[in-house]
């Protein structure tokens, strides 16, 4: 962390030096080179800092775990001997019910259309009923 603050200090000094010496031929070049070095160091730090890497890996693992959990059918409601299940496939949620006498599968999705600056979305649904 100390290295980061040191680099921020260097950038602040380089900005001041760049502003003061911008009348000279090399002032802007010096300023731009220091800014490029600072950005390079930040990119390097982002890719090599153990804390940042751990945070990024944890965040990616949480996203994958949530996606896998969403793909598994799970009971979201239960009433009158019927269970309502939900799971996500791709970017759509699918719902189905299981009752003693019939199974109903509902799929809903959102379709959006843009016309100029106006965006209009509508939710569409599709149902399939299977009886025993």
Image: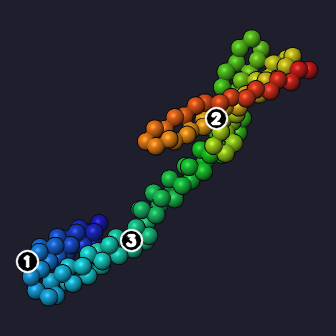
Q: Residue farthest to the front?
A: 116
Question: Residue 109 has which mark?
Answer: 2
Compared with 104, 45 (above or below) is below
Count residues near mark 2 (Cα–Cα under 10 Å), then give few for <14, some for 14-19, many for 20+: some
Q: How is the image coloured?
A: rainbow
Answer with mark 1 or mark 3, whichever residue precedes in sequence: 1
Residue 62: image location, x then y, percent? 55, 49
Disc 3 designates what residue?
43
Image quadrant for the C terminus? Answer: top right
Image quadrant for the N terminus? Answer: bottom left
Q: Secondary structure at mark 2?
A: strand
Q: Secondary structure at mark 3?
A: helix
Tell which tag, 1 or 3, sits nearer the viewer: 1
Tell which tag, 2 or 3, sits nearer the viewer: 2
Viewer-nearest residue: 110 or 56: 110
Residue drawn 20% across the image and 83% down it: 30
Answer with mark 1 or mark 2, whichever residue precedes in sequence: 1
One can see residue 116 in this view = yes
Q: CA distance from mark 1 to mark 3?
A: 28 Å
Q: Secondary structure at mark 1?
A: helix
Q: Is residue 48 left or right of residue 73?
A: left
Residue drawn 66% across the image and 25% down it: 76
Disc 1 designates what residue?
20
Residue 18: image location, x then y, percent? 14, 77
Residue drawn 43% across the image and 71% down it: 48
Viewer-nearest residue: 61 or 100: 100
């Amino acid at each position: 962390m100390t290295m980061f603050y040191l680099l921020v200090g260097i950038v602040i000094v380089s900005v001041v030096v760049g502003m003061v010496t911008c009348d000279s031929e090399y002032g802007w070049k010096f300023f731009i080179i220091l800014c490029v070095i600072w950005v390079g160091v930040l990119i390097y730090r982002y890719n090599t800092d153990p804390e940042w890497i751990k945070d990024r890996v944890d965040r990616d693992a949480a996203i994958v775990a949530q996606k896998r959990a969403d793909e598994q059918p799970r009971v979201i409601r239960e009433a009158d001997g019927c269970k309502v299940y939900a799971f996500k496939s791709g970017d759509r949620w699918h719902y189905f019910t299981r009752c003693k006498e019939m199974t109903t599968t509902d799929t809903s999705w959102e379709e959006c259309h843009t016309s100029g600056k106006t965006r209009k979305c509508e939710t569409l649904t599709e149902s399939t009923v299977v009886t025993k």
